[in-house]
Each structure stands twice: as structure tokens, then as C-alpha cells.
Amino acid sequence: MLIEETVKGHDIKLDTGNYYFSPSGIDKGTAFMLSNVSVSPDDKVLDLGCGYGIVGICLYMEGCRDIVMCDISDEATALSSANLILNNIEGVRVFQSDGLKEIPDDDFTLILSNPPYHTDFSVAKEFIEDGFKKLRIGGRMIMVTKRLDWYKNKLSSVFGGVKIIQQDGYYVFISEKRSDRFAPKKKKDKNNLSRKLQRKQRRTDR
């Protein structure tokens, strides 16, 4: 299926083929995520789970030229490659990859993803943990989902914090990498210990 979309003022042509996710138009969550993203020519972007390529193509038109797109689906990567040609875009790399396994770069300033949130959290967990390792210090991970608590907790535990923007049932999560290590887990406060452990702790403290 050939469609035309205007995203952030850019006219984009897309062949959505038989791809199962949002074939008749850009997904509302993806559009909401893109409305909260700005890029510069100095950015290096990963479109993680690119589908038929709308995010990478839009950010290229926004002025970013160092873009990598990846998806586990061979149909999605084929459509993304075709849509880059359809929009006269050159120099964007497209990988078929299970998560970030086949991505050689580890210096992205921005990773964007609309993860599959109708399944369990194993894919999202891998995206977040592996994405953290692929970002530069100061780089950001931006995700959009319809689920709040798990993503809020997971991104906070890995990155040390998260900014959340909500609209029409969608949540955009923005986390910044501030160090090379996952955020340290908070130590249990002594007062939160069980009574048995508190008694044991008091004996050792004497």
C-alpha cells in the first residue's frame, strides 16, 4: 500500500507493503513521539524497530544525516530501504537485527523506539538495557508506549531517571545516559528490614 503522510511539515511517501503494524497511516504513538523530538546535524540516531521507516526518514528530513535503522523483520527492513529510495534519501544504514545484536555502533546520541507493548516485557527490557550501552554519555533514549508503570520503573532503574509526557493514552519516555554504568540500585533502608533482620542488626551493632 502506498501512502503519503505530512509529519512535522515534511511530506513523506511510504510503501507499507503487507507490514502488519499501522499499514494505512502513521501510528498515533509514533507521531506523538516525533512531535517531542528535535535533532541537529551533529546527532547520531538509531531508529530501533524501524518498521517501514517513518521515524528515520522524518529525522533525516529534520536535518540529521547520521542515521541507522533496524528491525528484526526482513519485510520491515526491505520496506525501509525502499522508502528511503522513494524519498530520495541516501546514506542511511538499514540492518536486519534482533534488537541491537547486529548493530556495530555504540556512540548514538539518540535512540528512538515504539516497542511492541502488547506482548510481555522481554523485548522492551532488551531494548532498554542494550540501548543504554549503545548510547554516548549525554545520549537519550526515547520510547513511546501505552503502558506506564513498567517502563517508568525500568528506565529509571537503568538510567537513573525518566521524563514522561502523556497524551491521549500514550506515554513518551525520555531518559538520558549520565554514566557508563546502570543506575545503582538503592540500598534498603535499615528501617525497611524485617523485624527479624532488625533484631539481628541490633545484635551486630552492639
Image: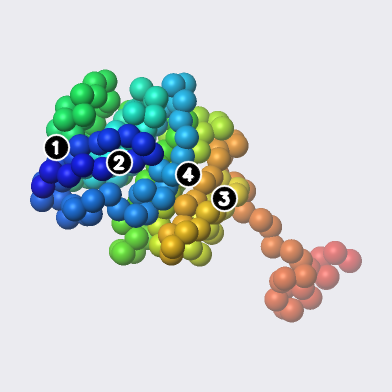
Residue at the location (15% across, 50% down)? 19
Residue at the location (38% across, 39% down)? 8
Observer-side mark, 2 or 1, equals: 2
Mark 4 residue crowding within 10 angstroms, few (<14) / some (14–19) / many (20+): few
Amino acid type for the residue under numbered disc 2: Thr
Amino acid type for the residue under numbered disc 3: Val
- Judging depth in this view, the residue of 113 and 201 nearest the camera is 113
CA–CA distance in space, label 4 to label 2: 16 Å
* Disc nearer the start of the sequence (3/4): 4
Q: In the drawing, what numbered circle is on residue 43?
A: none
The percent position of residue 132, horizontal first and vertical second, equals: 47, 40
Residue 123 in which image quadrant: bottom left
The percent position of residue 13, horizontal first and vertical second, equals: 20, 37
Q: In the drawing, what numbered circle is on residue 78?
A: 1
CA–CA distance in space, label 3 to label 1: 33 Å
Observer-side mark, 3 or 4, equals: 4
Mark 1 residue crowding within 10 angstroms, few (<14) / some (14–19) / many (20+): some
- Judging depth in this view, the residue of 20 and 117 nearest the camera is 20
**Which residue carries the number 4 mark?**
36
Observer-side mark, 4 or 2, equals: 2
Up-down relation of residue 83 to residue 190 (above or below):
above
Residue at the location (60% across, 37% down)? 178
Looking at the rendered structure, the secondary structure element under dot 4 is loop
* Disc nearer the start of the sequence (3/1): 1
Colour scheme of the picture: rainbow
Q: Is residue 58 visible?
A: yes
* Disc nearer the start of the sequence (4/2): 2
Amino acid type for the residue under numbered disc 1: Ala
Q: In the drawing, what numbered circle is on residue 6?
A: 2
Looking at the rendered structure, the secondary structure element under dot 3 is loop
CA–CA distance in space, label 1 to label 4: 27 Å
The percent position of residue 137, horizontal first and vertical second, equals: 55, 31
